[in-house]
Image (cartoon, rainbow, N blue to C red):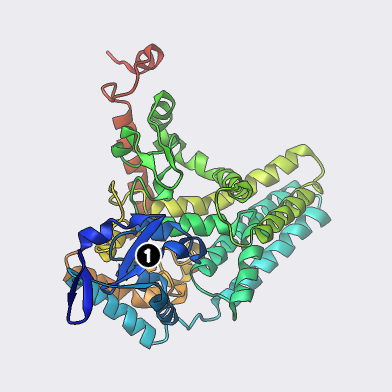
């Protein structure tokens, strides 16, 4: 029950937790309690972050994803209660101090000229690829054009990623234009799908039942915990560990790179499924659909200029294989890191973000290749920070982790690949264990019994 003390009314964390469903959704930010039930469907970041942190304190997540200008909008949701047992850990205090320092330094507003150079590079790649397809008859030139198209998709993906976290352009309207052009029109991937998936990933970093970036059954499983057929709260279905899953996962360390070469097909299909869904809300849905139509108009039309089906197929495969590098990069940052099962919590934000991420050590001249995600821990902790500042703030994050004895992992690109394959192989060998609770199958046992 609420108690009135010094003109303030208080509720406990236990009482707050009772308001954790879509029809009745409360959260706490800096000890004040807000009813955001009617805001869920209008939240610019989508409903998933609110639903995943419902009924608990979400201060650190709010600080990470919202600029100072957003705080003035909170009062209209205030229910008049304060959290009686609200407290701030030493880690959170230091984290919020860093956010305040970076804000004071103007880092969130200083975006540099990287976007201009990147867009110019993308435009040049596109022109050269189109020229090689249309104006040359050399098969090797056509193959190179396919590779350039894949590189274009990678760089376009970085623009889409960054513009979903902060304004990369001079205004929100131009930022939206950049999103639709770089995502839907150039790559055939819905920026709405990307934001929905990526926000869920950030909120529940490396949570097996909430983070969609680790939910790749039946093809991949990064932990034997997935063999318990747990529920995906993102896809709203059970990730069943059945005979097919067991077979595919048993060889996942061998199929990882081949699958990554064609992982873009999954993104195409997921984008279309979301845009055609009547149950999921997609802001400016028709903009997204038109953008996808633009992609599926120009890309097949460009391919049609190639002289025969052999070269057309080679061009498409080259595009997919090159852009597969980016899909590998996404996996390296998380597959070999610590995972957990359970509801995401708002009171261990810093710890969960550093625990579930892996940085890639590289020279500054290679930053363009990794798109800023080589500083994965820094990006997860400060998602609104332009990537041009991530290298600058890395020492401060590392020092904070050292101070509080928290994990901060950074390895070379080569070692990250080895660690990822080792994680996949470990789970693969565990999947081959015939004692796992999967329905018996004589064919499987015959193929995998030795001696």
Residue 238 visible in this rendered orientation of the protein: yes
Looking at the image, residue 81 lies above or below residue 220: below
Looking at the image, residue 320 lies above or below residue 379: above
Residue beneath the point at 72% across and 50% down:
296
Looking at the image, residue 324 lies above or below residue 245: below
Residue assigned mark 1? 380
Graded by Cα atoms within 10 Å as few (under 14), some (14 to 19) or many (20 or more), the crowding at tag 1 reads many
Return the residue nearer the eye: 62 or 143: 62
The count of marks equals: 1
Q: Residue 270, image x and y in percent? A: 57, 46
Return the residue nearer the eye: 382 or 83: 83
The local secondary structure at tag 1 comes to helix
Left or right of 320 on screen, residue 250? left
Return the residue nearer the eye: 48 or 65: 48
Q: Residue 370, image x and y in percent? A: 47, 62
User: If the image is split into quadrants, where does the N terminus sit?
Assistant: bottom left
User: If the image is split into quadrants, where does the C terminus sit?
Assistant: top left
Return the residue nearer the eye: 377 or 321: 377
Residue beneath the point at 34% across and 63% down:
26
Residue beneath the point at 76% across and 56% down:
132
Identify the image quadrant of residue 313: top right
Q: Residue 229, image x and y in percent? A: 35, 34
Q: Residue 249, image x and y in percent? A: 40, 32
Residue 409 visible in this rendered orientation of the protein: no
């Amino acid at each position: 029950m609420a108690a009135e003390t010094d003109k303030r009314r208080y509720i406990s964390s236990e009482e707050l937790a009772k308001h954790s469903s879509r029809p009745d959704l409360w959260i706490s930010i800096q000890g004040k309690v807000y009813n955001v039930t009617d805001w869920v469907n209008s939240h610019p970041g989508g409903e998933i972050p609110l639903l995943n942190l419902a009924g608990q304190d979400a201060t650190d997540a709010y600080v990470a994803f919202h600029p100072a200008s957003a705080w003035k909008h909170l009062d209209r949701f205030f229910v008049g209660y304060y959290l009686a047992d609200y407290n701030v850990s030493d880690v959170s205090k230091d984290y919020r101090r860093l956010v305040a320092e970076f804000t004071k330094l103007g880092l969130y507003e200083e975006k540099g000229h990287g976007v201009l150079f990147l867009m110019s590079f993308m435009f040049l790649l596109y022109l050269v690829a189109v020229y090689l397809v249309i104006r040359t008859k050399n098969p090797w030139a056509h193959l190179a054009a396919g590779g350039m198209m894949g590189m274009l998709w990678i760089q376009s993906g970085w623009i889409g990623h960054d513009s979903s976290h902060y304004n990369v352009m001079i205004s929100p309207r131009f930022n939206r234009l950049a999103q639709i052009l770089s995502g839907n029109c150039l790559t055939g991937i819905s920026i709405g799908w990307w934001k929905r998936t990526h926000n869920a990933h950030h909120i529940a970093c490396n949570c097996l039942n909430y983070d969609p970036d680790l939910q790749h059954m039946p093809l991949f499983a990064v932990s034997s915990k997935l063999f318990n057929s747990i529920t995906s709260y993102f896809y709203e279905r059970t990730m069943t560990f059945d005979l097919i899953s067991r077979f595919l996962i048993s060889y996942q360390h061998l199929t990882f790179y081949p699958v990554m070469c064609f992982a873009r097909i999954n993104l195409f299909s997921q984008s279309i499924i979301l845009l055609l869904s009547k149950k999921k809300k997609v802001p400016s849905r028709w903009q997204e659909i038109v953008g996808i139509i633009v992609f599926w108009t120009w890309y097949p039309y460009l391919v049609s200029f190639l002289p025969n089906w052999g070269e057309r197929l080679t061009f498409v495969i080259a595009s997919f294989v090159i852009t597969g590098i980016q899909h590998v990069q996404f996996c390296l940052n998380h597959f070999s890191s610590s995972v957990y099962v359970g509801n995401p919590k708002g009171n261990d934000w810093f710890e969960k973000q550093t625990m579930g991420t892996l940085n890639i050590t590289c020279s500054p001249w290679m930053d363009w290749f990794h798109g800023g995600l080589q500083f994965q821990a820094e990006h997860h902790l400060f998602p609104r920070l332009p990537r041009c500042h991530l290298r600058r703030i890395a020492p401060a994050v590392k020092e904070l982790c050292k101070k509080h004895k928290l994990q901060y992992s950074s390895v070379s690109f080569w070692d990250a690949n080895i660690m990822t394959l080792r994680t996949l192989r470990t789970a693969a060998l565990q999947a081959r264990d015939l004692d796992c609770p999967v329905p018996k199958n004589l064919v499987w046992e015959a193929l995998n019994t030795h001696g």
